[in-house]
Image (tube, rainbow, N blue to C red):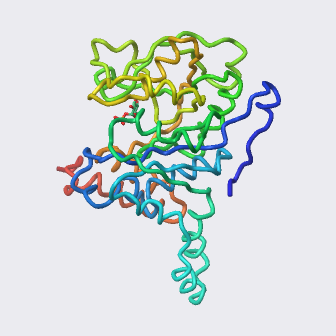
């Protein structure tokens, strides 16, 4: 069940449908987080009391997307269980009259219809997205990477979905990175967008994309954030994409192929907060930020954190 219904105005303005399905590639081996991810999928690592993946599905639901395809792999099927009902647990909580926990336990199963398919070999993000073809067909769809999410009070996806319904092309989101970090991301060159598109936010037109360039080869410091809205023709482009960075079939390369063939590619420059849980440092920062914002425990946690930062134990100012 979504909290906001899809905005039909974009479709009315252009005659094009707004994407209604999301794909979450989540088959990766999570080598940047070993050994924690040896038996636990990185998508299930908790941020306070919910797994990362729940924040991502919440983000889709908030944008009016209630059909979510999880691309899974070996050892990762427990992700699906999180979105299932647990009648035994629910009955126990009902008996105890614990309505709050009961609602929290039911919440994941109410967010969206979850579908799964399996990527048998991990040959890259483009390769993973290619497995969504039979589920999404030739319609536009969103891709949400399984290790990052944005602050729900600064939504990104609704504007991306509306922009894609207007252009019919590829829609990305960018954030600015330190120039030394370009080799961790897809990086783009841009020019100002057509004026009729800029009422949606800070929109730019993409003039080139490259996956994980060295700083000296990077066309800018605008990095591709893990949210995409793609037209159905991306599947054909993925089939025609050769292995690229890291020997993998890259989604960035497939999108660049479409762009060189004339598909418009636009992006929203996102100024909100992006949480990156794919590596230990980003994960820790995410947990601290989310915990500090929580209504139920934020005040106490912030007080403790301030004391800790100033204490000897943290190597803080008093040492
Ligand atoms: C992927 C994409 C990259 C994008 C990044 C965002 O890289 O290939 O273009 O900038 O996600 O997090 P990965 O993190 O899978 O190496």
Where residue 103 appears, as percent x and y from the top left, is 60, 71
Residue at image position (53%, 75%) is 86
Residue at image position (40%, 53%) is 43
**Front residue of this view, candidates 234 and 63:** 234
Left or right, 241 with respect to 264, comes to left
Tally the numbered discs.
0
Relative vertical location of residue 244 with respect to residue 118 in this rendering, above or below: above
Q: Tell me which image quadrant ligand 1 sits in.
A: top left
**Front residue of this view, candidates 147 and 11:** 11
Quadrant including the N terminus = bottom right
Residue at image position (68%, 26%) is 200
Relative vertical location of residue 196 with respect to residue 56 in this rendering, above or below: above
Where residue 32 appears, as percent x and y from the top left, is 26, 44
* Residue at the bottom extreme of this rendering: 95
* Residue at the left extreme of this rendering: 319
Left or right, 255 with respect to 201, comes to left
Quadrant hosting residue 171:
top right
Left or right, 192 with respect to 279, comes to right
Residue at image position (36%, 47%) is 120
Where residue 42 appears, as percent x and y from the top left, is 35, 53
Where residue 169 appears, as percent x and y from the top left, is 61, 22
């Amino acid at each position: 069940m979504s909290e906001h219904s899809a905005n039909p105005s974009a479709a009315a303005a252009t005659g094009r449908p707004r994407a209604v399905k999301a794909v979450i590639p989540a088959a990766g081996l999570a080598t940047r987080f070993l050994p924690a991810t040896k038996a636990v999928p990185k998508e299930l690592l908790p941020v306070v009391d919910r797994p990362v993946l729940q924040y991502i599905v919440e983000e889709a639901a908030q944008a009016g997307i209630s059909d979510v395809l999880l691309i899974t792999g070996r050892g990762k099927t427990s992700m699906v269980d999180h979105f299932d009902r647990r009648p035994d647990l629910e009955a126990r909580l009902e008996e105890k009259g614990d309505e709050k926990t009961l609602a929290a336990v039911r919440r994941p199963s109410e967010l969206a219809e979850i579908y799964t398919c399996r990527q048998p070999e991990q040959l890259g993000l483009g390769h993973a997205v290619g497995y969504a073809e039979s589920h999404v067909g030739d319609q536009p769809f969103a891709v949400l990477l399984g290790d990052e999410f944005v602050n729900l009070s600064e939504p990104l996806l609704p504007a991306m979905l509306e922009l894609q319904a207007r252009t019919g092309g590829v829609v990305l989101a960018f954030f600015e990175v330190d120039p030394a970090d370009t080799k961790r991301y897809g990086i783009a060159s841009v020019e100002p967008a057509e004026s009729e598109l800029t009422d949606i936010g800070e929109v730019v037109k993409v003039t080139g994309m490259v996956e994980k360039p060295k700083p000296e080869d990077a066309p800018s410091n605008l990095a591709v954030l893990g949210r995409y809205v793609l037209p159905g023709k991306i599947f054909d482009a993925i089939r025609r994409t050769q292995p690229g960075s890291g020997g993998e079939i890259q989604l960035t390369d497939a999108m660049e192929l479409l762009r060189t063939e004339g598909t418009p590619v636009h992006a929203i420059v996102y100024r909100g907060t992006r949480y990156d849980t794919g590596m230990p440092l980003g994960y820790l920062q995410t947990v601290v930020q989310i915990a500090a914002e929580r209504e139920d425990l934020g005040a106490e946690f912030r007080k403790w954190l301030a004391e800790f930062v100033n204490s000897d134990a943290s190597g803080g100012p008093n040492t």
